[in-house]
Amino acid sequence: MLTGALIAGVIFGLYFTLVGLGLNLVFGVMRIVNLAHGDVLMLGGIAAWALFSGFGLHPVVTALLVLVVFLLAGLPLYYAVVPRLLRSRDAEMLSLILFFGVSQMIEAVTTISIGATERSLPPRLMGVGPIILLGTRLPKAWFFSAAVSALAVLAVYLYLYRTRLGTLTRAVMVSRDEALATGIDVNLVSAIAFGISLALAGIAGVFAPFIMGSITPNMGVALNITAFAVIVVGTLGNPVGTILGGIIYGVSVMLMQTYLSSWANLLPNLLLIAVLLVRPEGILGRKVRRA
Amino acid sequence: MLNSRTRRAVLDAAIVAVVVAGMGIARGVYSNELMLFNFVMFLTLSQGLNIIYGFTGYLPFGYVGFFGAGAYGFALAVMHLHLPALAAMGCAALAALILAVVLLPLLRLSGAYFAIASMAAAQALYEVIANPDLEDVTKGPYGVSLSNVFAPALSYYVALAILAVTLLLVVWLRNSRFGMSLQAIRDDSVSAAMAGIGVVHGRTVAWVLSALIAGLVGGVFAWHISVFYPDTAFDLSVSIFSTVFLLFGGATTLLGPLLGVFILYGVYNVIGIAVPQYFQFTYGALIVLLVLFLPNGLVSLLTSRGIRVP
């Protein structure tokens, strides 16, 4: 039972790495918290459901579409909101409030247009039957989602460390002002990072119906807490550190579900509070205490 | 002639008197008592939030946690200790107080971290109370019924009394040395500490006061409503509404949150009830526009021109 929980946890955790990855990228580059991240993810899930039930499109195709559409949508959204926000007195705090507003708008529009009912996709789309690993039976969809997550993490890593734009992005992460002084088009670099972040959330959303069973328009808020827990447990502002956070989160959720199932929902909240309180500087890698 | 300081205090007290008396009279002339009660509730909650956010700069997204703690403190005292309602209100305050003390370490976090951590704390408390394993104690997700203490008139006036005390507390903070020192801490905690202000002490007092108010409102809500579920007592929209009212009107003032509640909650009651999503959308859009164009609220239209707002 223990090995089963551990294996399921790692697979589950890889998926949650993808959930947190975009949020962390935005935080790293812009020092703002996109509290609408969970709702963007939900939109990805809605897209997968709508395109499958309307046109029979396979979720993998939807994922590619979502990648392109969300990436492009991120650019104008960035220019509309973020530069103005970053000029304000306390951008980090205000970003939280502002994107909370965005999250409410997304939730409202989705509920108005498709209703509040749960939507799901048939799991057989990802292959029939379980995969058996060391005696643990896991649905194929889980492996598929974990593989996509691993690919996405790899792609983000290659982007950040192997491309010119990625080098510029890391320069902005280290110091926005110095990057600006060096002549880097900070806004363009940030806008692309913002677009990538939305695309990552969208792709995570496409696979959400398989991992979470179903999607609803109001799932965003809870997902935000989870995503935040994942990136805080990993390293805030360091996208690659998200893998660590995701896997710690996944394994602990699976252990909780195995041994104390009714209390499993408590976990992301407690994990988040505990890490913030016990090792904010150490794990986060930046000062968050004021008093 | 009165000096300007006394004049301010008199004006502030007059506003408090008008609001409290107005809400008291309204109950006699308007029949929708639940709506009026909700007004009193949000007037109090947004001022309670004002004490912690307006005066210290900490914005607890999980403010509803204290509200829920108060509601369940009241409910558990009535169900298990069979206390009379007024004594159970004491338990509501106690529950919020305990939660505030437990969460004191959160004040070591700043900005967004504090906001998110407090939201996680409220969510964690909800998960505990709504847990089916605790059905014997809290009735789990199935909700509580307190019909034997149901007293709509008395509970309304108790809520009104809590509102009055809260408003007077804000008046005091705005006009006292302690309130000024809190604002100094908010603006620059290092300089404030250098000037001899007890930073940790100040924040702790504001946090506990603010939690106590939400706990009392939660208790009186439980009393007035008498049947509710964990989903209602820990509904995140309690936090959201209070925050939006506060930001819309303008924090750190007495008038700002009052305006916020009367205008926005008034509009909500006219158009929002039928299709809440339209209102949710409007709220979201309003938050976005406020942050971008009017981060200090409605009253900043006046204060930025040098006019003092109570």
Image (cartoon, coloured by chain):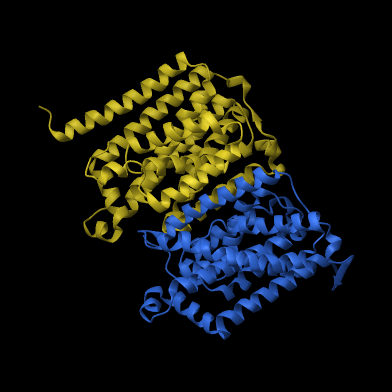
Chain colours: A blue, B yellow
Up-down relation of residue B36 to residue A283 (above or below): above
Q: Which quadrant is the N terminus of chain B positioned in?
A: top left
Q: Spot the residue most to the left.
A: B1
- What residue is shown at x 64% (from left), y 78% (from top)? A155
Q: Does the image show residue A101? A: yes
Up-down relation of residue B280 to residue A254 (above or below): above
The answer to whether residue A228 is left or right of residue A2 is left
- What residue is shown at x 52% (from left), y 63% (from top)? A76
Q: Residue B11 at what x, y percent from top left?
A: 24, 29
Q: Spot the residue most to the right.
A: A129
The answer to whether residue B12 is left or right of residue B113 is left
- What residue is shown at x 52% (from left), y 46% (from top)? B284
Q: Which quadrant is the C terminus of chain B positioned in?
A: top left
- What residue is shown at x 78% (from left), y 66% (from top)? A142
The answer to whether residue B232 is left or right of residue B282 is right
Q: Spot the residue most to the top.
A: B28
Q: Residue B54 at what x, y percent from top left?
A: 36, 46
Q: Does the image show residue A236? A: no
Q: Locate residue B14: give its quadrant.
A: top left
**Mark count:** 0
Q: Residue B246 at what x, y percent from top left?
A: 41, 41
Q: Residue B249 at what x, y percent from top left?
A: 38, 40
